[in-house]
Image (spheres, helix red, strand yellow):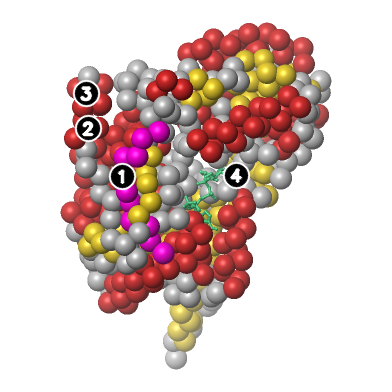
Amino acid sequence: MTSLTQTDWRSLARTLRPRRQAFIDGRFVDALSGRTFPAYNPATGEVIAEVAACDAADVDRAVRAARRAFESGVWRDLKPAERKAVLLRWAGLIRENLPELALLETLDTGKAIKESLSVDVPSAAAAIQWYAETIDKLYDEIAPNGPSSLVMVTREPVGVVAGVIPWNYPLIIASWKIGPALAAGNSMILKPAEEASLSALKLAELAQEAGLPDGVFNVVPGLGPEAGQAIGLHPDIDAVLFTGSTEVGRKFLEYSARSNLKRVGLELGGKSPHIVTADADLEKAAMYVAYAIWYNLGQTCNAGSRLIIEQSVKERFLELLRPWAQRLYPGDPLEPTTELGALISAEHLDRVRGYIELGQREGAEVAIGGRQIGQERGGWYLEPTVLVGVKNDMRVAREEIFGPVLSVLEFDRLEEAVAIANDSPYGLAAALWCRDISTAHRTARQLRAGTVWVNAFDHTSINAPFGGYKQSGHGRDKSLHAFDKVTELKTTWVELH
Ligand code: TAP
């Protein structure tokens, strides 16, 4: 890693030639219409590539290739150990291409190169490796039905699976969809977000190098209402694994109802509560609260965006938080020491600033940060921000801001904190800081969220399921549970006469 931290990323960026064509049936191709859309570098506002803008015709071409590959058995009928070997090779190639993939991710999303190198690329490789390793270790079942029947319950791939993903963690979220879909023997079509397609196209190149047969993995960059909608409505896609906003997730359920009732896995938004009691280790909690909201500039679905703090320690806690807002100050993402980079787009920056203003109009006050910075670089930067005096019925407490803005709410009794935490349309994650073990367990059970951390935030592992309660979605990414959406269960009943 020493050499990577000393790399001159700016020079490397100048020589980088990102792939910009779609990857369909084992070939890089332009969109049939010939259209493209610009990929921007959020750190500078500059266009870094013109990417193929796929639409319904390209999606159809990809689906045909994926279906052909599936029906031919070229992938699903491989011996498990052979399929495993290809995916392991792919994971290995992702690791070997760490500098280029990390650079693409940073240039395309504005996130700090330090994070792309240490988190995004390694996590994506680890996820594909983890699912590869399950392939020859998962056994099927026999349902006990007496001596004269053999009732087998087996898992089969659903067929053609599409992944439609957002821009905040392009490689990581892609790997959560790719891993189980391909390990199970499906063919796959991936639609990256318009704002961040470049790393997915590099992944496609590496997939081919690893030996994935043509048509098994396809990437169709394009706009949501064009490529995304075409995927949602396509009659020959069996499942869509979607991560993104609750609003677009709703559309995928409609697309499914209007087309072939394809399965839809939804990982959607959040407004995660972070409860801190007076008896907690406040210094440690302050560090976690800071990272929970400011890591990746709050552009994280499970960001701890609502701090619910015991009133008696609120002032002290804010003082503990203040140095973290300084330390996690945004800078040039290509500088190896930078912790936080830029927000994804000018529109998103405006939207987040709009929420800060809205919070003030609703009666909250800016206690930390709140200003746009770094205009001289041309990019889209915002200070880590804290709003105090927030009530849970304000829009800044109810809606997902998806930016570095922490809304602070207060409580006297823990039951109140739990009620505030659960009073949300979302239920992706929650956290609690307290020292009493019975209180911790009781409260963890009461919190309505797919993940509850006690005395931590964002600790994660590929073997722990991730997904939401309520309008944060349904189905789970990660862990063996991710196979549920991409496999069919078949019962084969044999009578032994
Ligand atoms: P969305 O706008 O929902 O976009 C997600 C994906 O859907 C993108 O590929 C997008 O394409 C596509 N899309 C947009 N409009 C569409 C339409 N009408 N039909 C079909 N597809 C469409 O989300 P985003 O802005 O990229 O990401 C932010 C949201 O994702 C936040 O709400 C966040 O909470 C959520 N998120 C959730 C999680 C988990 S795991 N729960 C993880 C990360 C993010 P374009 O890019 O071309 O618009």
Is 346 rendered above or below residue 328? below
Q: Is residue 412 left or right of residue 496?
A: right
Which mark, residue 7? Answer: 3
Q: Quadrant of residue 152?
A: bottom left
Instruction: Tell me the kind of residue under disc 4.
Output: Gly
Mark toward the start of the polypeptide (3 vs 1): 3
Q: Nearer the viewer, mark 3 or mark 1?
A: 1
Q: CA distance from mark 1 to mark 2?
A: 12 Å
Q: Is residue 494 left or right of residue 430?
A: left
The residue drawn where x is 78% and y is 28% is 362
Q: Is residue 231 left or right of residue 286?
A: left
Mark toward the start of the polypeptide (4 vs 2): 2
Front-lying residue, 317 or 219? 219
Q: Which residue is mark 2?
A: 14
Is 277 rendered above or below residue 486? above
Q: CA distance from mark 4 to mark 2?
A: 35 Å
Front-lying residue, 223 or 268? 223
Give the x, y percent position of residue 497.
Answer: 44, 91
Task: Inspect this view and state whether residue 441 appears.
Answer: no
Q: Which residues are magenta?
A: 45-55
Mark toward the start of the polypeptide (4 vs 1): 1
Which mark, residue 269? Answer: 4
Mark 4 vs ligand 1: CB below 8 Å: yes
Q: Which residue is mark 1?
A: 49
Task: Inspect this view and state whether residue 471 appears.
Answer: yes
Front-lying residue, 292 or 82? 292
Q: CA distance from mark 3 to mark 1?
A: 23 Å
Q: Quadrant of residue 204?
A: bottom left
